[in-house]
Image (cartoon, rainbow, N blue to C red):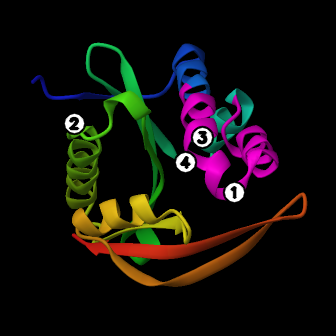
Amino acid sequence: MTRPLFHRVASPADIAVVANLAREIWVEHYVPIIGRAQVDYMLDRVQSESAIAQQINEGQEYYLISRDAPAGYFAVLPEQSSRSMFLSKIYVRKGLRGRGLGKAAVEFIEGLCRARSLRTLWLTVNRNNSASIAWYERMGFRNAGPVVKDIGGGFVMDDYRMEKNI
């Protein structure tokens, strides 16, 4: 099996691919966990083409995961002051999960951390997203405690912070 490719998102065309992947993956994965209304709100707020472009302009780095075709994406935000990197998003299309794409992406991100002398990789995950929590634990992350955040629109993100030392 060929290794996945990681392509840094920069162009409007790349951003459109990410936004389309986000809609496909989020609707499939998150509607059963947080409901359609919150998924639609969050897609519009953080994964629309304009929101992604703004995040990139503010320093987030988006990457497409490809193996012959777009398979998923991830986004990271280096935080030099705390010597950490926030893994804000990592998603793989349903039909391509379980093939090592996510693991290869985490290894790639760990390489980014090492190249920038960042010591901690961290993320937040919905506390009811048990399959993803288990996967993060298999990838070496540990639960660092709850994080509850009001995101507006009457919605709350009820997450765990997961961390991994690099």
Crowd around label 4: few <14 · some 14–19 · many ≥20 (10 Å): few
Three-letter amino acid code at disc 1?
Ile
Q: Which residue is mark 3?
A: 26
- At 21% from the left edge and 36% from the top edge, which residue is drawn? 99
Three-letter amino acid code at disc 2?
Arg
Three-letter amino acid code at disc 4?
Gly
The disc label shown at residue 99, or none: 2
Disc 1 secondary structure class: helix
Residue at the outermost left position: 1
- Relative height, residue 132 to residue 16 (above, below): below
Q: Which residues are magenta?
A: 21-48
User: In this image, 57 relative to 77: left or right?
Assistant: right
- Real-space CA distance between mark 1 and mark 2, rounded to the nearest whole angstrom: 26 Å
Disc 4 secondary structure class: loop
Crowd around label 3: few <14 · some 14–19 · many ≥20 (10 Å): some
Give the quadrant of the C terminus. bottom left
The percent position of residue 56, horizontal first and vertical second, equals 58, 39
Q: Which residue is mark 4?
A: 59
Give the quadrant of the N terminus. top left
Determine whether label 4 and label 2 are within 8 Å by CB: no
* Magenta segment main secondary structure: helix
- Relative height, residue 111 to residue 83 (above, below): above
Is there any visible trace of residue 83 in the rendered image?
yes
Crowd around label 2: few <14 · some 14–19 · many ≥20 (10 Å): few
Residue at the outermost front position: 32
For marks 4 and 2 on the same chain, the one whose residue lies earlier in the sequence: 4
